[in-house]
Image (spheres, helix red, strand yellow):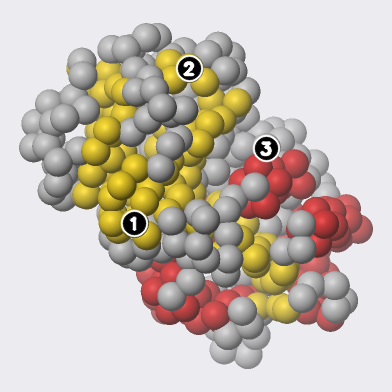
Amino acid sequence: MFTTAWTASPQPPSTGFTPNWSQEGFWRHSLRQAVRLTAGGDRVRIRLSNAYGTSPLRIAGATLARTAVGAAVRSDPVRLTFGGSASVEIPARSQIIGDAAELAVAAGEAVTVTLHLDAVTGPATFHAQAFTTSFRGPGDLLEDTGGAGFEEATESWYFLSGVDVSAGRTDGVALFGDSITDGFGSTPGTDRRWSDALAARTGRPVLNAGIGGNLLLNDSAWYGEKGVHRLERDVLALAGVDTVVVLLGLNDIGFSEGAAEPTYRPAPRVEVAELVAGHRELLRQARARRVRVVGATLLPFAGSDHWGERAAKVSHEVNEWVRCSGEYDAVADLHRALGGPGGSDALSPAYDFGDHLHPNDAGYRVMAEAVAAVL
């Protein structure tokens, strides 16, 4: 019995926040990506996504190893198979789960997945903000251990959407949200997102299903499919998840406030009733799969580019509904946990990354503590 120990929500190829390879894709490359697991087991399998591909994706080969420094690995790579074959073709708009490989891993350990892409991939399904480094190099580098052949680097993940382990656990917690869940503002390369902090605090598998800029009610070329459409794929279809924490809606409210923001235009002015209906749709989907749902209040964001008189009103009303409606199984009041003295609408300076919207490492630890208290 398998448990998902790491995940990254797929996104369409896009320019994104930082330079990436999603629109150009790959040809005759090896792609090396390291991920940190939140559960351990004796066997490991990977999930690969071609959700936004317009043609079949050929994987010429894949390996798994223990992560070292940079592109190096500290164990001999283990060859991965797919239905017993070393290579596989993933149809457009599809995903696959590979065969289980023998490799004993522990919770908190990082593993490295290397893919050999010998044919033109076309634009690549990816996850824009990894906050850790991925690498590529020319040719077949599946057995490379030192990492010298990997000449280019990026801070995104490509095609790799999940890693499962033979833990047999059914107490996984998925965090469903936007850039705050994704980890923007945390120190890159250090695994200090609030999903990492929550896994360390609870000892449970914790899965990060955040996408920077994601909206609850509307799709975006940069920010992925809307939350009400992607919950099934990005959370409910994962192995061993019994709880989802919902922290979504801030961009629906705030994007209409930033006149200079070019990435989501036109940004509709969303009403409270629409956001509540979106939350109820998430609740309906989760409960149909018998998954417990924790509602999180929106963080304080006064002074940010998302703030304005209307945003303040709508966010207050949404937060009151989350707190008082009784529709969620439990509530984590992150607004109060991270606000300044006296219930401030601004992030406490001790927890502010600097843009008055995203927490820093200390703020993410506080978020994890607040959620751990209601799991």
Q: Report the mark closest to the observer, 1 or 3.
A: 1
Location of residue 329 with respect to 120 vertically, above or below: below
Count neighbours of disc 2 (C-alpha within 10 A) and say few if under 14, some if 14 to 19, many if 20 or more: some
Q: Position of residue 235 (x, y in %)?
A: 63, 52
Q: Position of residue 317 (x, y in %)?
A: 83, 70
Q: Report the mark closest to the observer, 1 or 2.
A: 1
Is tag 1's residue or tag 2's residue first in the polypeptide sequence? 1
Location of residue 188 with respect to 156 vertically, above or below: below
* Secondary structure of the residue carrying numbered label 2: strand
- State if disc 3 and disc 1 touch (CB < 8 Å): no
Task: Determine which residue is flagged by label 3.
Answer: 225
**Residue type at mark 2?**
Glu
Query: Which residue is found at the position 27% from the left and 33% from the top?
Result: 79
**Residue type at mark 3?**
Glu
Count neighbours of disc 1 (C-alpha within 10 A) and say few if under 14, some if 14 to 19, many if 20 or more: some
Is tag 3's residue or tag 2's residue first in the polypeptide sequence? 2
Location of residue 330 with respect to 311 vertically, above or below: below
* Secondary structure of the residue carrying numbered label 1: strand
What whole-number distance in Å separates the C-alpha atoms at marks 1 and 2? 27 Å
Q: Position of residue 263 (x, y in %)?
A: 59, 34
* Secondary structure of the residue carrying numbered label 3: loop
Q: Quadrant of residue 55?
A: top right
What whole-number distance in Å separates the C-alpha atoms at marks 1 and 3? 34 Å
Task: Determine which residue is flagged by label 1.
Answer: 42
Mark sitting on residue 113: none
Query: Which residue is found at the position 32% from the left and 12% from the top?
Result: 118
Location of residue 223 with respect to 116 vertically, above or below: below
Is tag 1's residue or tag 3's residue first in the polypeptide sequence? 1
What whole-number distance in Å separates the C-alpha atoms at marks 3 and 2? 24 Å
Task: Determine which residue is flagged by label 2.
Answer: 89
**Residue type at mark 1?**
Asp
